Amino acid sequence: MRPIPALLLRDRADARAFFERDRPWAAWALSSLGADDWPASRLWVDDATGVGVWTYDHPVWGGAVTTFGGGAALDALLRTVDLPRRAFVKAMPPARAALAARYRFEWLDPLVRMATTSATFRPPDAAPPSVPLGAEHGAELARLYAGWPESRFHVGRLGHGYWYQGIREGGRLVAVAESGIRAPDEGVAIVQGVYVDPARRGRGLARAVTAALTLRLFGAGARDVVLDVRAENAAALAAYDRLGYTVHANFLGGPAGPHPLGIRR
């Protein structure tokens, strides 16, 4: 298929209308509609087919790419748009080849997008108590997240609006959940960074800390809360399912950088 002339949506209302077609999948993109983030965002669409490509390229937060739709129309659209030099990419599996022509991936793994609402969420009847964590708890968080380097936690996040909910045992932080992206005006929020000390796993702590953070997000105005899980993590999928999170999409995600052969269109 010949490249499709892409329409760049510059109006936030138009972009919002496009994202509202699939709120759980568009959660990150919806969160970019605020005045601080919209200048770093771009949304290209093809009106005839409804496919789209959202990009985010911020000097502090880095880059992101999410694709909407698939097939030959999306492949053609991807040949025409400007993508961030480096980005975390999220796309449905059929878009793999088209993205591989534009990026070199560090890894590109099967992931699952799960979503819940205040109407479908089911907090546990009994759970270990948890507490919100702030800037004064940076050393505790760093010590716990040191067991999971892929989280890329750094204490600077505490000064940039990230929320943390934690569980302590014997005075030591043993479980945590993170939310760095919340958009009350759009009614969406994202849970991430759920981690439990390996010695304390299998006792429902991940479910408990995720439930507590999810309730905080609903209380702050979220209507939809989403999270991503590796497809092979059956225990996490089951834990979130028990909370009322349901599978919304199976997709591919991973960090990407410049293609070694340059941009191939």
Image (cartoon, helix red, strand yellow):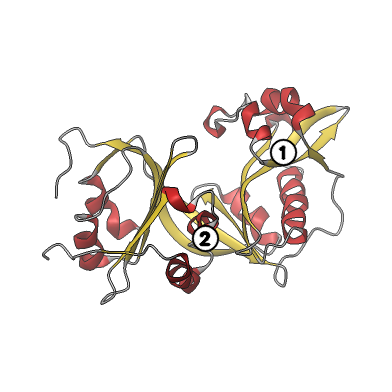
Q: Position of residue 101 (x, y in %)?
A: 20, 46
Q: Tell me where residue 143 sits by quadrant.
A: top right
Q: Tell me where residue 222 sits by quadrant.
A: bottom right
Q: Alpha carbon of mark 1 to alpha carbon of mark 2: how far?
A: 25 Å
Question: Compared with residue 121, is residue 65 higher up or lower down, i.e. above or below?
Answer: above
Residue on which the image places disc 1: 176
Q: Position of residue 199 (x, y in %)?
A: 72, 29
**Label 2 element class:** helix
Asked if the residue under mark 2 is in contact with the one under mark 1, i.e. CB atoms within 8 Å, the reply is no
- Front residue (pair 99, 83): 83
Question: Compared with residue 250, is residue 65 higher up or lower down, i.e. above or below?
Answer: above
> Which residue is pictured at 88% across the width and 28% down the height?
170
**Label 2 crowd (10 A; few <14 / some 14-19 / many >=20):** many
Please give left or right for residue 233 compared with residue 155 in the image: left
> Which residue is pictured at 23% across the width and 45% down the height?
102
Q: Tell me where residue 172 sits by quadrant.
A: top right
**Label 1 crowd (10 A; few <14 / some 14-19 / many >=20):** many
Please give left or right for residue 265 compared with residue 165 in the image: left
User: Mark 2: which amino acid?
Assistant: Leu
- Front residue (pair 211, 50): 50
Which image quarter is the N terminus in? bottom left
User: Mark 1: which amino acid?
Assistant: Val
Q: Position of residue 48 (x, y in %)?
A: 25, 77
**Label 1 element class:** strand
Residue on which the image places disc 2: 30
Give the mark toward the camera: 1 or 2. Answer: 2
